Image (cartoon, helix red, strand yellow):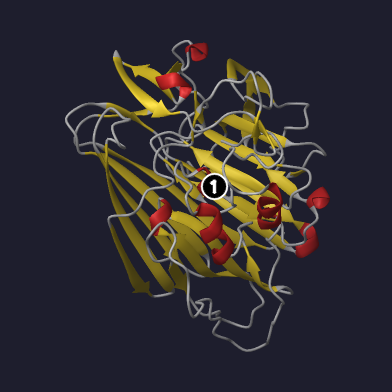
Amino acid sequence: MTTLSGIRFFALCVSTSMLGAVLMGCGPTNPKETESPTKTDTVVAKRPQIGGQDVVVLSRGRSGTGSKPEFLSATLLPGRGMNTFQFTAWVPGRGETNVLASPTLEDAATLLSGDAFGNHSFQIGGGAFLIPFANRVLGKAVNGGKDIQIEWQGKKVTLPANWVANNAGVPMPGHDRQAMHGLIVAEKSDSVSTAKTADGESFTGVMHAGNFGGHWFSENDITVTTALTGPSIDVQVTVKNVGKSPEPMSVGWHPYFALPSGDRSQALLHLPGLNTVEVNNYDDVVPTGKLLSVKGTQLDFTAPVGVTLPNKLLDDSFVDLVKSPDGTVITELRDPAAKYGIRVIAISPEFRAIQAYSPTDKKFVAIEPQFNLGDPFGKEWKGKNTGMVTLKPGESVTWHVKLELFVP
């Protein structure tokens, strides 16, 4: 879930100008297309540690003549909840291109330093994983407003209230604090491994998350696998309840997909959501419990080839997702000026929402597949299934998404 006030950023110690520069840093490198196969070296000589752990870069050489788009690398942050920080791709006519609107690793290391809650992990463009809930959670303010309390099946837990409506990083008075985007975005992995594959490399990271520092209903292990090949990037997140109590569980993802041309006005979005979640306003973004049909509105992106983005802030949760014949939910972002397209395939049957976010002054579109609706424990839903999966002890759930490139 995204915030709605400009650059959506909690009042932490990073200047507005610096973050603005980061979010704009999503352009491609200089194209160096040749007619013969080349090996693209995406590994820099020295990378900063982030979150106290080494950055992991998966890479592969470009195949063929360069006439087709293909993925080249994946940069991952095990020290920041296994964040999928950046992907690069070969784009015919453009060369090596950033897929995500992320900053440099050096800038990211500075931005994430001292970020105790991990808010910057989901603000800098890379793909933060959102566990055990995505989006925002509201509840009873406790501990002087530093935390909120929620209840599930008669049991109560407290969550850090790490978010409040803000204007360019300055908290807005009169707005309630919220818990935002889960509890692992600032956490380290417990083990990491990589392996060569026939057409690339794969990464596996494990986090023994327990009960997320006393903030959840049971103990958990999390395994993230990211597989890089030329045709696709395949990402799977499995959460297993290793504790003694049942619990609600959700997984989400928060990537900002760059528009290589830099021209948002001609970008096309296909998103097969029949309804959006009504919210109280675009500062608090609190769901009212009402769903709104997209038919006949600027938020109807169901056309197969996509629809032009509205000339206003897009920050909406799309639900009642129409599945393809194979049971997946497919979202596509087209950048015709760059002859570039990316396909986000949500594979797991548990997906109930896709959050889309795109400010008019930025050159990206966030496409965020997630299990749960916003404020999933809120009374406004009146018992509706909000996408939280119940895991009994010993049970697990897997979040599975695949990315594919195509020429529009």
Label 1: which residue? 120
Quadrant of the drawing holding the C terminus: bottom right
Task: Write the residue at 47% across / 16% down.
Answer: 378
* Identity of the residue furthest to the bottom in this view: 36
Q: Nearer the viewer, residue 334 or 248?
A: 248
Under circle 1, the secondary element is: helix
Q: Nearer the viewer, residue 252 or 341?
A: 252
* Whether residue 324 is visible: no
From the viewer's side, name the closer residue of 238 and 358: 358
Q: Is residue 258 shown above or below 173?
A: below
Q: Is residue 237 visible?
A: yes
Quadrant of the rendering where the N terminus is positioned: top right
Where 388 sits versus 310, above or below? above
Left or right: 267 as drawn, with respect to 276 = right
Q: Is residue 202 left or right of residue 373?
A: left
* Image location (x, y in percent) of residue 94: 72, 73
**Vertical order, 60 against 182 (above or below):** below
The residue at the point 74 percent across, 49 percent down is: 362
Res 103 → quadrant: bottom right
The residue closer to the viewer here, 166 or 341, is 166
Residue occupying image coordinates x 37% and y 57%: 225
- Inspect the image, locate mark 1, and give the three-letter code of the amino acid beneath it: His
How many other residues sit within 10 Å of disc 1, few (<14), some (14-19) or many (≥20)? many
Q: Position of residue 134 (x, y in %)?
A: 47, 35
Instruction: Indicate the position of residue 184 as horizontal and vertical percent values.
Output: 39, 43
Name, please, the residue furthest toward the left. 244
What is the tally of numbered marks visible in this picture? 1
Say which quarter of the image contains residue 57: bottom left
